[in-house]
Image: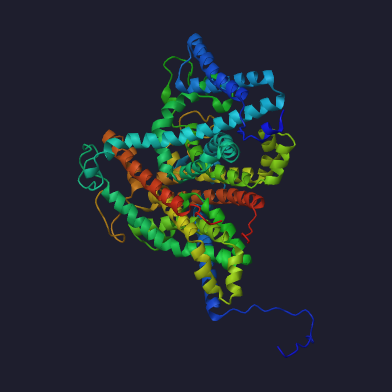
Amino acid sequence: MMAADLDLPRTITTRSFDDRASWMTSMAGAVGVVWLLFQLSGWSGKLGFTVVWFITYVVLYAIITKVGNPWPAVVDRLAAAAVAGGAAVVGLALATTVIYTVQKGWPAFSHVGNFLSESAAGVRPTAPLYEGGILHAITGTAIEVGIALLLSLPLGLGTAVYMTEVGGRAARTVRTVVEAMTALPDVLAGLFTYATLILVLHLDRTGFVAAVALAVTMTPIVARSAEVALRVVPGGLREASLALGASQVATVFRVVLPTARAGLATSLILGIARISGETAPLLIVSGASTYQNLDPFSEPMNSLPLYIFAAVRSGQPNFIARGFGAATVLLLLVTILFALARYLARPKKGSR
Amino acid sequence: MTAVLEPLREDVPRELERVFTPADKAFRRSATGIGLTVLVLTAAIGLFLGYQAIPTLHRYGLSFFTQSQWLPQQDIIGLAAVLVGTVEVALVALVVGFPLALMTALYISEYAPAAIKGWLVAAVDLMAAVPSIIYGLWGFFFLQPQAIHVSRWLAQNLGWIPIFHVDTDANSASWAQTKFTASAFIAGLAVSMMVIPLACAVMRSVFAQAPLGEREAALALGSTRWGMIRTVVLPFGQGGIIGGTMLALGRALGETVAVLLIISPAFDIKPNILEVGTETTSALIAGLFGEASKAQLSALLTAGFVLFCLTLVVNTVAAVFVNRSRSGASTEI
């Protein structure tokens, strides 16, 4: 070989023709084998077909690979096939969740005119979909989440600042506890709020009580993710600020917090997304109205999760359809919040 | 400079004093105050539930944990069947969720093309953000009609194992579909959708930290990709795998709404996970709270306290494992 040949640019691919051919052949071959098997044995069912197909594909793939490759290569390909298969199952499950909800919610959601702008006051569960809507649930969720945010923002952010900027042995205890709290069952936040506000303080099941339950769920979530955001602020920045003579207050408020702004916003938005769909605490502490109620301190309020729960358990086809419509609204809300959080947290161009 | 510095007379180690300005002191105090408030609030959850639990535990004693029936009208109340159901649903969720989460995490960190990696990470995060009631709807309306066929297949072929046994003739042409619905198995499948993203995110972040040098060393020595994963990534990520799974277990033990939507309540201790009817602690609380009498409320608060203790233990063990595998140090420049 001449030296000039070696200097030519070439493509560096990890897949040779042999790789690709044996992969495709086994995929296609497995379809044929399984189809024949199902014809002969009288088995049926899409799910069964897919499972048997995947197993056949893996076996075929192994046999074909073994012809021209050593054993480690066979194991490598089988592992790759299994890992990709597992990821595909999870992807499929997520996709069906979203598609199914939107598809079932569309009949109600397509009546946007009344569905999003009217409440359910005076509307029978069996009423046709062009009557009534979920405005009372949307405003209820908005008010409750708003109050919960007002309560948990200072607590969560303050705790995060305490854990990263003040520190000490007590801070480690707080971190451990907060971490354990984030995974605590949400139903317990409802029980706690019930035991304190309703049993001890004798408050009614109003929107405010529901908001407190949501705040109890949200605070540790915000504290923990805000702490992560503050922790990635380079220590060098803090030292530089202190070395220039700034006090710690100035360092925190003018260097650390602004640097972590995007991360903090993300943690807040994810906290909001989490509590807007929270159902279990509301089942315990919240009443459910069918009419529009904008006052969080008197009369019960409805909210999207409670509305969905009541609707799908009613057994009335039209009411179930409304429930799915409300679930579509909730899913849309969470997705928008999520996209916003991703947008704020995106890596900036030109920064390291 | 004209003055010549004299050498320090007392060139000996001395104590350093940290001096804060008044503003700094105020800042540190208020931050500490907020942090401790949250700590107290958390402790209060346990204390309040524990305080409410005292009368019930006093009244029923140990039989609260051994009695399986829940008949408040006849003054018979016990958590035995409920706790068994809780563990069954959580175990089904883990047995299904663990391999899927591990494979998804491995796929994202090791196999996925760089171009779509970011999207996959976002998809898993979005999956974690989807409210559990939506997974409940999916599990009840979409998954259940499909999953009962899987249940039936398991009962037909593995029915001799007690956990897969269903008390009906699974082989008959007109098989009793209602015997297979609303079971711990189907509830566990729905819960697995909630624990997969949680476990997957922890595992992926630990896999991503596997040292690059060792990965390259394995590949340079001629290892296949799987060989590299098996010898470098998986051993390095062991703590994350265990911790992520424990976190998932904690979540699965406490999942409420999805389970409440799917199961039909039944208070008997049974290993047959495919058969209709089961009950979990959180679903019990959420389901009965609305129409509970005073005595029953106290019993439900006690059930909440038991759940609190259970998940706190599981989550603390998980946090220990995850923290061991992830350094808590801040970033330096």
Colour logic: rainbow
Residue B137 horizontal side relative to residue A173, left or right: left
Residue located 64% across and 18% down the image: A63
Viewer-closest of A336 and A173: A336
Quadrant containing the C terminus of chain B in the rendered view: bottom right
Residue located 56% across and 37% down the image: B112
Residue B289 seen in render: no
Which of the 4 quarters of the picture holds residue B207?
top right
- The correct choice, above or below, for B236 with respect to A241 in the image is above
Q: Position of residue B129 (x, y in %)?
A: 45, 46
Q: Position of residue A3 (x, y in %)?
A: 71, 33
Viewer-closest of A172 and B87: A172
Viewer-closest of A4 and B174: A4
- The correct choice, above or below, for B170 with respect to A276 in the image is above
- The correct choice, above or below, for A51 with respect to A200 in the image is above
Q: Residue furthest bottom?
A: B3
Residue A53 seen in render: yes
Q: Position of residue B16 (x, y in %)?
A: 70, 78
Viewer-closest of B148 and B60: B148
- The correct choice, above or below, for A53 with respect to A316 in the image is above
Q: Position of residue B118 (x, y in %)?
A: 51, 44
Residue B143 horizontal side relative to residue B327, left or right: left
Which of the 4 quarters of the picture holds residue A129?
top left
Residue located 62% across and 50% down the image: B322
Residue B32 horizontal side relative to residue A212, left or right: right
Q: Residue furthest top?
A: A40
